[in-house]
Image (spheres, rainbow, N blue to C red):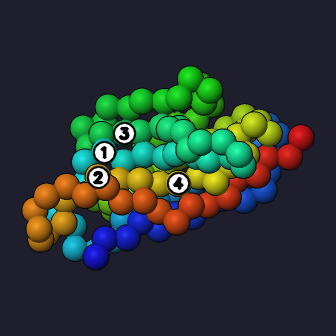
Amino acid sequence: QVQLVESGGGLVQAGGSLRLSCAASGSIFSINAMGWYRQAPGKQRELVAAITSGGRINYADSVKGRFTISRDNAKNTVYLQMNSLKPEDTAVYYCNAFVVPMTPRREYHFWGQGTQVTVSS
């Protein structure tokens, strides 16, 4: 069974920084795209950033220039460095990954449990 475990959320003042990590574990053959979504109270879940296995990156317009996504393929881990945080970045952040397990050899979409990020003004 594949699991995604997130860490790094917390409370920070506006203008501060946080770094989120998400490690995939289990019987993994390969991981294709990985990324981060967020969901604020009363709002729909939205894409924050995504990165393919080849390193192609996509950001939401609202975080461009402030957030940086990266991954360590050897560790099956994706990171989200968040700088210049704003109160509107407050949300539960979810990691997701498209994983091919050892068996069966087909792609599945997995989600982490979510980590709270709160930015105070």
Image marks 2 and 4: residues in contact by CB distance under 8 Å: no
**Is the residue 106 above or below the residue 87 in the image?**
below
Question: Which mark is in front, 3 or 2?
Answer: 2
In the image, what residue type sits under mark 1? Ala
Q: What whole-number distance in Å separates the C-alpha atoms at marks 4 and 1?
A: 14 Å
In the image, what residue type sits under mark 3? Ile
- Would residue 19 be seen by someone viewing this image from the given angle? no
User: Which residue is depicted at the point 58% across and 35% down?
Assistant: 67
Q: Which residue is mark 1?
A: 33
- Mark number, residue 70: none
Image marks 3 and 1: residues in contact by CB distance under 8 Å: yes
Q: Specify few, some or many for label 4: CA neighbours under 10 Å numbering under 14, 14-19, or 20 or more.
A: many
Left or right for 51, reference 27: right
Q: What whole-number distance in Å separates the C-alpha atoms at marks 3 and 1?
A: 6 Å
**Tag count in the figure?**
4
Q: Specify few, some or many for label 3: CA neighbours under 10 Å numbering under 14, 14-19, or 20 or more.
A: many
Image marks 1 and 2: residues in contact by CB distance under 8 Å: yes
Image marks 3 and 2: residues in contact by CB distance under 8 Å: no
Helix, strand or loop for disc 4: strand
Q: Which of 52/91 is in front?
A: 91
Q: What whole-number distance in Å separates the C-alpha atoms at marks 1 and 2?
A: 6 Å
- Mark number, residue 98: 2
In the image, what residue type sits under mark 4? Tyr
- Mark number, residue 51: 3
Q: What whole-number distance in Å separates the C-alpha atoms at marks 2 and 4?
A: 14 Å
Q: What whole-number distance in Å separates the C-alpha atoms at marks 3 and 2?
A: 11 Å
Who comes first in sequence, dot 3 or dot 1? 1
Who comes first in sequence, dot 4 or dot 1? 1
Left or right for 22, reference 7: left
